Image (cartoon, rainbow, N blue to C red):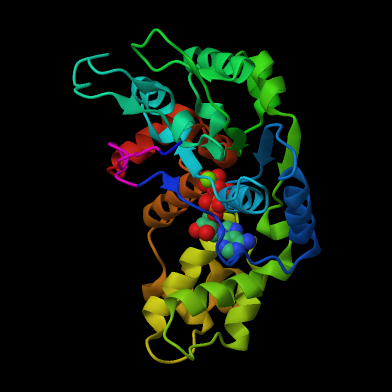
């Protein structure tokens, strides 16, 4: 089946990757990550849904693509949808497609992402954010193996391998009634947990060098001090935070090697002893409000934009966080 999809109306990105048969760009030096990839390759041979768990920025989408790329579906599309990025009504018609005239603005019929992923993989990222009414519809599609476009009366069979990802505790959401238990059991058949970067320090330097090779000028390297700072940092934002730290270093270092001073402040401050810190000139001290703002923004980013999680991690109420963000103009 040949399907055509235009770019997403909301994010402007083409959600369909024609084929994932490209040279692997995944860095996996650590035993922990190699185990995940070995498991993903085994799961690629099955057809049951896969649930990928892991903190934000650990590489869940990278693993989903690897899974798709190592199975028999590799030449069919890999279709990625970020469930959290679309409003509920749009998400439904994006996933299921719609008939011409199904609602105001539906001037033409549209192929849904389920159809676009026929023969391949449909990757539902941030599955925990799916609204309950749509969860019921997704369950129906999975049970029947059929999709009915919004505004259509007939259904047709689709064969898309479902891979989901979340950084949230789905069991807890089920217990609180925010996620359907029946859907949880349907999706949670084969499970992969992508370890945080803290759990696989062996990947830090190889990843940093890979990002430097991609972003930096040829021949630019890290100094020993910079590499030690990279190894000391706990990486709450995982691989994404590391990629950003390398960009920071590349931007500040210019032609020379990337030293510790070129890395983001949270990395440089950690290695400084109390003694050295206490000797900092008064002029270099930053106002508390500014430090707080940076830290709050960092927490929200590290929690993948989830205010609920960031508030929990910071030990403050959601309303307090919301007021702070509003004050910062966010
Ligand atoms: N092992 C890896 N090798 C190379 N690049 C990686 C690896 N893991 C992650 N990345 C890169 O890090 C970034 C974050 O990865 P990804 O989007 O897969 O994380 P995620 O777990 O899906 O995050 P989120 O929960 O925020 O959606 C991407 O730019 C990705 O290309
Ligand atoms: Mg993701």
Q: How many marks?
A: 0
Tell me what residue is drawn at x 56 percent, y 37 percent: 119
Kindly indicate the quadrant of the structure image that contains residue 143: top right
Residue 90: give x, y in percent of width and height: 34, 25
From the viewer's perspective, tell me whether residue 182 is left or right of residue 307: right
Residue 246: give x, y in percent of width and height: 49, 72
- Given residues 205 and 324, the one toward you in this image is 205
Kindly indicate the quadrant of the structure image that contains residue 24: bottom right
**Dominant secondary structure of the residues highlighted in magenta in the image:** loop
Tell me what residue is drawn at x 41 percent, y 68 percent: 285
Q: Is residue 100 something one can see in this rendering?
A: yes
- Given residues 81 and 265, the one toward you in this image is 81
- Find out whether residue 49 is within the magenta segment: no
Magenta range is 3-13
Tell me what residue is drawn at x 44 percent, y 92 percent: 256
| Image quadrant occupied by the C terminus | top left
Residue 142: give x, y in percent of width and height: 61, 20
- Given residues 142 and 258, the one toward you in this image is 142
Tell me what residue is drawn at x 42 percent, y 49 percent: 297
Vertical order, 271 against 45 (above or below):
below
Q: Is residue 271 something one can see in this rendering?
A: no
- Given residues 272 and 241, the one toward you in this image is 241
Vertical order, 218 against 247 (above or below):
below
Residue 329: give x, y in percent of width and height: 27, 43
Residue furthest to the front in view is 1
- Find out whether residue 7 is within the magenta segment: yes
């Amino acid at each position: 089946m040949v399907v055509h999809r235009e770019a997403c109306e909301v994010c402007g990105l083409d959600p369909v990757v024609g084929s994932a048969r490209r040279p692997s760009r995944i860095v996996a030096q650590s035993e922990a990550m190699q185990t995940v990839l070995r498991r993903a390759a085994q799961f690629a041979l099955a057809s049951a849904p896969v649930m990928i768990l892991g903190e934000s920025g650990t590489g869940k989408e990278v693993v989903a693509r690897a899974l798709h790329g190592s199975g028999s579906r590799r030449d069919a599309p890999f279709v990625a949808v970020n469930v959290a990025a679309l409003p509920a009504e749009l998400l439904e018609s994006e996933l299921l497609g719609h008939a011409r005239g199904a609602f105001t603005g539906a001037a033409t019929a549209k192929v849904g992402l389920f159809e676009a992923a026929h023969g391949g993989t449909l990757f539902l990222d941030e599955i925990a954010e799916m609204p309950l009414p749509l969860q019921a519809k997704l369950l129906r599609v999975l049970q029947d193996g059929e999709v009915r476009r919004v505004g259509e009366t007939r259904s047709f069979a689709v064969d898309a391998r479902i891979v989901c990802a979340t950084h949230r505790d789905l069991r807890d959401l089920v217990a609180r009634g925010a996620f359907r238990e029946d859907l949880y059991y349907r999706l949670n058949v084969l499970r992969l947990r992508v370890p945080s970067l803290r759990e696989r320090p062996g990947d830090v330097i190889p990843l940093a060098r890979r990002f430097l090779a991609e972003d930096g000028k040829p021949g630019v390297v890290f100094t020993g001090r910079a590499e030690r700072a990279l190894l000391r940092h706990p990486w709450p934002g995982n691989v994404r935070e590391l990629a950003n730290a390398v960009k920071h270093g590349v931007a500040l270092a210019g032609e020379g090697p990337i030293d510790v001073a070129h890395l983001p402040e949270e990395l440089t401050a950690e290695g400084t002893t109390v003694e050295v810190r206490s000797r900092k000139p008064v002029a270099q001290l930053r106002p508390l409000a500014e430090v707080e703002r940076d830290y709050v923004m960092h927490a929200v980013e590290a929690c993948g934009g989830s205010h609920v999680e960031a508030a929990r991690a910071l030990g403050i109420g959601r309303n307090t966080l919301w007021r702070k963000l509003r004050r910062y103009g966010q």
